[in-house]
Image (cartoon, rainbow, N blue to C red):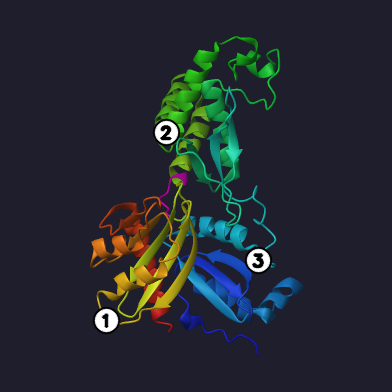
Amino acid sequence: MSFLFKAAEYPSSPGCYLMKNEEGSILYVGKSKNLRSRLRSYFTKNHTHRRIKQLVQEIASIEVVLVNNEAESLLLENNLIKIHKPPFNRALKKDNSGYAYLQLTADELPRLDVYYRNRSRHQKIAEPEEIHRLGPFKNARFRDALLEFVTEHYGLRTCKTMPKQVCLLYHIGKCSGVCEGKISKQSYLNNVRQASDLLAHRGKGLIETLYDRMETYASKMEFEKAQQMLISIRNLEQAADKQIVDREAVIDQDVIYFGSSHALVAKVEAGMLSDFQMFALEKPNDAASGDQFMITRYAEAKPDEIIASRICDRKKVYTSLKKRGEKQFILTEPKRGLKYDLLQLCKNNYEYRINRL
């Protein structure tokens, strides 16, 4: 039986959609600024592409994840495709595809390089907290231009294998020549430290540096370079748009929004939103039912942090879940900040899903 698409059941807001077959396996992950309009196009157009026709024929259900803006939909789509590897998604499956960061390498004399986060559930690698990155970048061309600018500004090397003599980049002023001792190792590492601080502050210092460089170009009447620098500034400011679906974190979190009858659980793995699941509460309209839900759900295994929209008896929940000899975990009921924003995202998805039950 073919899937019956009803446009009114889907919101005209940004988000991602997961198309599934009768077995519940994900066939395709997509994103849109307007989910209703995008999904309608699959079922109202006469598609000539054989692959799209086949996809539409196999669809049995469509799951929707709502987000706050287009940037979040782009990043969430990238994460979900890498995690689930749907058969009808050809792009973004590889780890070295999609939206990357800039990160200093772990070499004795580090260089700045493009970094793709590991998004596999089965191959998650713990990373030290001191690693600093800038990104993720939606625009690869701008990311590469920024890499070149920061590398040149701090005189960082670009060579993967250290040569014994300086190359052309040193002679044209784009490298400090640490390979041949044109700069001391300590001075080079000081430059690396400054670049690291820039990444740690998410590029705030870089914007100021770019403005200074732009004014220098303008004062020398190099107006074309000044204009290009202004474009870089605008792109960087845009790249720093607020988004909460792909963040830097070394812990796993479950974010739980409790309604009167159900709970929506969002899984955030190493800062990356990866899944939403709805569960019925045993005692609807009972304020304490959320506490019992957490005690039951996490009796055997739990994430590093549980973020909940309500906790009636925090001590009881924590004592019930904390096992002797086990590492500490965090139980949070936020009222503001990033964790509160995650809860609001859960609330939006809860309200959408509860209306469809």
Amino acid type of the residue that numbered disc 1 sits on in the rendered structure:
Asn
Q: Secondary structure at mark 1?
A: loop
Give the labeled residue for mark 3. 86
Instruction: Categorize mark 3 by other alpha carbons within 10 Å: few (<14), some (14-19), many (20+).
Output: some
Give the labeled residue for mark 1. 285
Q: Residue 302: where, in percent of width, then height?
A: 43, 61
- Specify the segment rendered in magenta: 239-244
Going by the picture, which residue comes out furthest to the right?
50
- The quadrant in which the C terminus is found is bottom left
Q: Secondary structure at mark 3?
A: loop
Tell me, for residue 275, which label it has, or none. Answer: none
Q: Earlier in the sequence, mark 1 or mark 2?
A: 2
Q: Viewed as shown, does residue 264 lie left or right of 149?
A: left
Asked if one can make out residue 278 in the rendered structure from this viewpoint, the answer is yes
Give the labeled residue for mark 2. 207
Q: Residue 153: where, in percent of width, then height?
A: 52, 23
Going by the picture, which residue comes out furthest to the front?
324
Which residue lies at the image location 60% right of the left edge and 19% below the top edge? 175
Amino acid type of the residue that numbered disc 3 sits on in the rendered structure:
Pro
Amino acid type of the residue that numbered disc 2 sits on in the rendered structure:
Ile
Q: Earlier in the sequence, mark 3 or mark 2?
A: 3
